[in-house]
Image (cartoon, grey):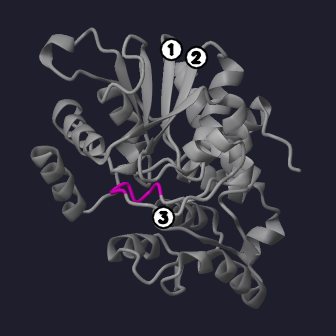
């Protein structure tokens, strides 16, 4: 069994990040004018990252971890959006050919963005369970290196660089909130934060109808759910990854669940009060604080993990917040 990543792995990953990776700011969010200057919620703005989301850190770390001969062959992976764009951008920057397997119904916006960064997109049909087998088949047929973004230790280490920045740039932090899907970013951030500052609470956040990690932690093992229904399409995992799950077991203090309207309300609050655009999956951590799911007395940093969304989704979020 692969050993858990250590703090030194995350520090090494952060030290090797290319110059195009931004050290994103941490900004306060006041829900109303009376809170200005006395905010308890702060946002780690990975929506301002070079590709509009946090995953380019891990993509760069993963490609750096490959041998020169492996990078020359190129890599293949599957992604519904943000990892696709992250690997495409990092691959172009590092001169590594990238192939991304996507479902036929992936949004045209995400496909175009991935291709725009120079990647080859391979559509594999409509069955999500066929994505990883397609990755393995293309790796064999084309001589590519197959990447499983759920289970590669460098992925988790790359994500952990966000946690290092939080504790280094904001010493007052008492609580960190992070979204959970397959578990990689939560695993990385939680490991970095807890190894540096074990006194800080780290809490994962999931939508009520996309709560595989929540169920898995209750049962003590990675467990698949047989339902999934959330506007937060970036949190698409119906089962957490084996490798990140072990980090969640060790380092997370809790996972809390939020409603769809909480996501919509948080989107509106971030847009109007902080002037920040967040995609549905990107705002769930802030939503947990704003919806009263965590201790509001603690100085809290919520990971705003991405801001890649279409105008249609933006309008849908605004409508949800207005009508429920």
Secondary structure at numbered mark 3 = helix
Residue placed most toward the observer, 137 or 201: 201
| Disc 2 secondary structure class | loop
Residue 188's place in the image compared with 228, above or below, is: above
Callout 2 touching callout 1 (CB < 8 Å): yes
Q: Is residue 227 magenta?
A: no
Q: Residue 44: percent from the left, percent from the top?
A: 43, 32
| Residue farthest to the right, as pictured | 1
Q: Position of residue 253 (x, y in %)?
A: 60, 26
Q: Is residue 74 above or below residue 182?
A: below
Picture quarter with the C terminus? top left
Does the magenta stretch mainly form a helix, a strand or a loop?
A: loop
Residue that appears at 78% across and 31% down: 8
Q: Position of residue 13 (x, y in %)?
A: 71, 41
10 Å crowding of disc 3: few (<14), some (14-19), many (20+):
many
Displayed quadrant of residue 141: bottom right
Q: Which mark is residue 200?
A: 2
The magenta segment = 230-235
Question: As rendered, which of 145 and 93 lies closer to the eye?
Answer: 145
So how many labels did they put on this image? Answer: 3
Q: Mark 1 sits on what residue?
A: 174
Q: Residue at x 39, y 80 (%)?
A: 105
**C-alpha distance separating marks 1 and 3:** 32 Å
Q: Residue 273 shows which numbered tag?
A: none
Among numbered discs 2 and 1, the one appearing first in the sequence: 1
Numbered disc in front, either 2 or 3: 2
Which residue is found at the position 52% from the left and 66% from the top? 84
Q: Nearer the viewer, mark 1 or mark 3?
A: 1
Q: Which residue is mark 3?
A: 85
């Amino acid at each position: 069994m692969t050993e858990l990543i250590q703090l030194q792995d995350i520090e090494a990953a952060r030290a090797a990040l290319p110059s195009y990776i931004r050290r994103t700011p941490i900004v306060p969010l006041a829900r109303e004018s009376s809170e200005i200057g006395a905010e308890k919620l702060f946002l780690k703005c990975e929506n301002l990252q070079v590709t509009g989301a946090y995953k380019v850190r891990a993509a760069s770390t993963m490609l750096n971890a490959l041998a020169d001969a492996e990078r020359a062959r190129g890599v293949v992976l599957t992604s519904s959006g943000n990892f696709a764009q992250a690997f495409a951008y990092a691959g172009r920057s590092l001169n590594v050919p990238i192939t991304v397997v996507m479902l036929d119904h992936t949004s045209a916006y995400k496909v175009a963005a991935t291709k725009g960064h120079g990647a080859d997109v391979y559509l594999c049909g409509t069955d999500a369970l066929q994505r990883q087998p397609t990755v393995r088949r293309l790796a064999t047929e084309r001589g590519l290196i197959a990447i499983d973004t759920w289970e590669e230790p460098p992925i988790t280490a790359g994500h952990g660089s966000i946690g290092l920045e939080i504790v280094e740039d904001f010493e007052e932090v008492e609580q960190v909130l992070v979204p959970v899907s397959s578990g990689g970013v939560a695993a990385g951030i939680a490991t970095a934060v807890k190894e540096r500052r074990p006194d800080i609470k780290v809490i994962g956040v999931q939508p009520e109808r996309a709560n595989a990690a929540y169920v898995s932690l209750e049962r003590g093992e990675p467990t698949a759910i047989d339902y999934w229904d959330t506007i937060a399409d970036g949190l698409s995992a119906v089962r957490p990854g084996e490798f990140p799950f072990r980090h969640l077991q060790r380092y997370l203090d809790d996972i809390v669940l939020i409603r769809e309207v909480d996501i919509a309300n948080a989107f509106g609050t971030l847009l109007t009060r902080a002037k920040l655009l967040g995609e549905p999956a990107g705002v769930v951590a802030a939503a947990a604080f704003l919806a009263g799911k965590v201790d509001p007395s603690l100085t809290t940093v919520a990971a705003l993990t991405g801001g890649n969304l279409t105008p249609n989704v933006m309008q849908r979020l605004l409508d949800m917040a207005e009508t429920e």
